[in-house]
Amino acid sequence: MKHLALTLVASGLLLAGCGTMAPDYQQPKAPIPVGFPGEMGGSSVESQAWTSVIESDKLKQVIALALKNNRDVKLTALNIESARAQYQITKSDLLPSVNGTFSQTAQGKLDGGGVSHSYEAGLTMASYELDFWGRVRSLKDSALETYLGTESAHQSAQISLVSTTVQAWMQLSSDLFALQESRKSFDSYRKTYDLTKARVDRGVSSEVELRQAETALQASRSSYLGYQGQVQLDRNALRLLVGDEVPENLLPSAEDIQAPLVMDVPAGLPSDLLNNRPDIQEAEHNLKSANANIGAAKAAFFPTISLTGFAGSASNSLGDLFDNGTGIWRFVPQISLPIFNAGKLSAQRDVAEVTKNIQVATYEKQIQTAFKEVADALATRSQLQQQYDAVSGQLKAAEAAYKLADARYRSGIDSYLSLLETERSLETARITHANLLLSMQANRIVLYKALGGKLPVPTP
């Protein structure tokens, strides 16, 4: 009995090693150029993860909190667990299921005759499909690729969360800076209004000038209050991304946006860097899963051979159940021939092949979309650099004008009103400069996301 059960299990293991009818997988050729527009493709690069890409320690800690607490990322992690469990279920179908059993049978006659008892105990192998044609193995391969695809989807969710968290943190810093500068501007307009009112009281200025100063003051106050509200919205958005309260010591300051926060991307990017993108890897896993399903659909045309077996002891007396000579065995093989459902099987095979073609098109579209995202980010980077040069020149000119106006005011050449106007122009230039810095650093994190969660650095 023991040897018989072992033989059944060994046979199942051997049959599980058979091949499948799935087509040989060929990775589709990427329908994109080798390099990006305006870039020298084919350079030798290696990638760095986000922990090396982010240059602010405070921001790194906020990202770590988000990855730990964010509900969307937790949901994708649960999907991985579900796919892993499904893969294990499908994989287990390759091996026989052996269970211990015990049964008692009582039999008697309706005319009141005696009752006879029989007992049976042993090992039962549940109905087990002998996978000659690779149907079960193809389903196992398909489940494995689905599982790997969910892991890639989880990585995509993490990359999106890192990118969005960085942008939210930087936006809060930028708006804090704008709030700080708008407060200075509001104070400046209030001083202008007070001076104009004093001049009107002395009969030096007209009521029209006072109303103009009041209009400018109220507009400045509205802008200041708007930034106050925006800062609160930024805090709420960051709290949602992190999934918890962000410690005060990890929140950005108004000055953080002025410092480098994200590593810049070097020039010369080959398009094969897109292979780092988890969404492309997910699309390829879905393609491989569809390819394996073709094998299962083809194998369904062949006979299905199932086997149920039992090895154990039987006796009419419970006390003699395990004595010598009570050992029994039986096998119940079953062959199922697909005869009258060939149309259904043909349709299922056609569906599997069409599904694979759909996945091929999806895979190619995903690569093309990724290429466009990187190309757009690189084009935006070039434009932003030119704008930054112009705005930096504007800021330098505004700073020089303010110094000159301050000197002229102290020398008694110009009025205080002229100095205040120059100061407001400088504050506006500073906000414009900070907003452009935000756009440039946000562009870097967009490239980080578009390149699959890693920024390339030149190899030595």
Image: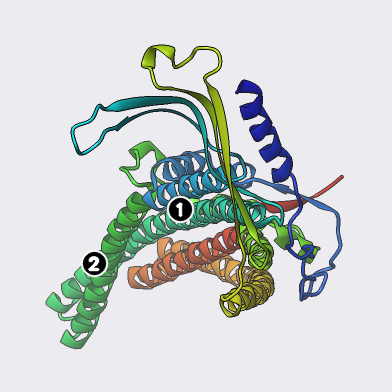
Residue contact at pointers 2 and 1, CB within 8 angstroms: no
For label 1, the SS is helix
Residue that appears at 66% across and 70% down: 363
- Which residue was labeled with disc 2? 190
Residue 437 place in picture, x, y as percent: 55, 61
Give the crowd class for mark 1: few <14, some 14-19, many >=20 residues within 10 Å: many
Between 202 and 211, the one lying in front of the other is 211
Residue that appears at 43% across and 40% down: 68
Between 146 and 28, the one lying in front of the other is 146
**Can residue 275 be seen here?**
yes
Residue that appears at 60% across and 61% down: 279
The quarter of the rendered structure image containing the C terminus is top right
Residue 325 place in picture, x, y as percent: 55, 17
The quarter of the rendered structure image containing the N terminus is top right
Q: Is residue 114 left or right of residue 152?
A: left
- Which residue was labeled with disc 1? 165
Give the crowd class for mark 2: few <14, some 14-19, many >=20 residues within 10 Å: some
User: Looking at the picture, which amino acid does disc 1 mark?
Assistant: Thr
**Can residue 383 be seen here?**
no
Between 430 and 188, the one lying in front of the other is 430
Q: Is residue 239 left or right of residue 286?
A: left
Between 67 and 409, the one lying in front of the other is 67
Quadrant of the image occupied by residue 216: bottom left
Residue that appears at 32% across and 43% down: 244
Tell me the mark number nearer the camera, choosing from 2 and 1.
1
For label 2, the SS is helix
In space, the residues marked 2 and 1 are separated at their CA atoms by: 37 Å
Residue 268 place in picture, x, y as percent: 81, 63
User: Looking at the picture, which amino acid does disc 2 mark?
Assistant: Arg
Closer to the chain start, of discs 2 and 1, is 1
Above or below: residue 97 compared with residue 185: above
